[in-house]
Image (tube, rainbow, N blue to C red):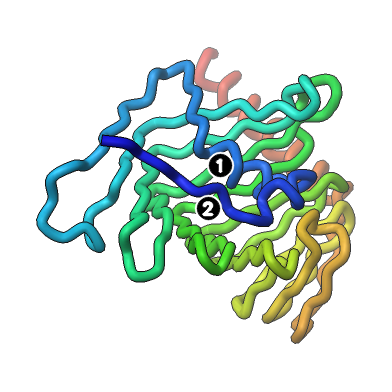
């Protein structure tokens, strides 16, 4: 039996982005944990049965000989004979991007994901968290990543956490690197008082130390 998986057409074109690289390299699963892979042969309903199942995968992705990304997932299933072929990640995904010093400078995680092959579309669900290269954090419950149009968008509530403020809104659209974005219905902007947070943390630590000193006396 031969197993043939078609690479999405736009993946290489968009390889400068985190998820684009991920789509290409998820075919080449290389894991230090030696992931378990199952290939289904004799089945009664091919549309509802995955052709390939892989568990505990961790993939290192290189670009021009330099390690750039790491992709992790606890479970990956390929439904290539479904009416609309798709990949299923029922336990979520974790993407990490490395800088020149091999430190993580961007990442995206979610608790469940589906990739629609014909549409070239990622659907990221449940506690989606993304961080761009500027350190901004994006939090929402559902995020769509359309690689054909090179757009990231959501109709859900979204929080954008910046260094000095938090922006909340409903509906969101961005480029693939999360560096140019619009919020459709802004709901509010709240400043982050880092000095106040630091004073609060210092007070809590001082109180904890006092309690420990009393216990030792």
Which residue shows up at 29% across the image and 47% down it?
Answer: 51
Q: Position of residue 99 (x, y in %)?
A: 82, 29
Q: Is residue 30 above or below residue 19?
A: above
The front one of 190 and 200 is: 190
Circle 2 residues within 10 Å: few <14, some 14–19, many ≥20: many
Quadrant where the C terminus lies? Answer: top right
Q: Is residue 31 above or below residue 96?
A: above
Mark-to-mark CA distance, 1 and 2: 7 Å
Badge number at residue 157: none
Q: Is residue 40 above or below residue 180?
A: above
Which residue shows up at 39% across the image and 19% down it?
Answer: 34
The front one of 13 and 110 is: 13
| Outermost residue to the top | 217
Badge number at residue 94: 1
Badge number at residue 110: 2
The answer to whether 28 appears left or right of 85 in the picture is right
Q: Is residue 34 above or below residue 55?
A: above
Q: Position of residue 161 (x, y in %)?
A: 77, 58
Quadrant where the N terminus lies? Answer: top left
């Amino acid at each position: 039996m031969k197993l043939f998986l078609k690479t999405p057409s736009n993946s290489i074109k968009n390889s400068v982005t985190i998820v684009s690289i991920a789509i290409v390299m998820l075919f080449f699963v290389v894991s230090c944990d030696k992931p378990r892979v199952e290939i289904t042969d004799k089945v009664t309903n091919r549309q509802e049965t995955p052709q390939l199942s892989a568990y505990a995968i961790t993939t290192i992705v290189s670009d021009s000989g330099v390690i750039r990304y790491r992709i992790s997932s606890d479970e990956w299933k390929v439904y290539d004979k479904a009416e609309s072929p798709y990949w299923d990640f029922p336990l979520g995904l974790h993407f990490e991007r490395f800088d020149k010093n091999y430190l993580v400078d961007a990442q995206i995680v979610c608790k469940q994901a589906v990739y629609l092959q014909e549409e070239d579309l990622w659907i990221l669900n449940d506690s989606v968290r993304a961080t761009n290269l500027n350190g901004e954090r994006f939090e929402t419950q559902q995020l769509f990543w359309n690689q054909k149009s090179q757009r990231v968008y959501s109709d859900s509530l979204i929080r954008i956490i910046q260094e000095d403020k938090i922006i909340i809104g409903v509906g969101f659209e961005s480029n693939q690197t999360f560096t140019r974005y619009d919020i459709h219905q802004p709901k509010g902007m709240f400043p982050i008082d880092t000095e106040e947070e630091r004073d609060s943390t210092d007070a809590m630590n001082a109180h904890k130390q006092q309690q420990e000193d009393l216990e030792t006396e």
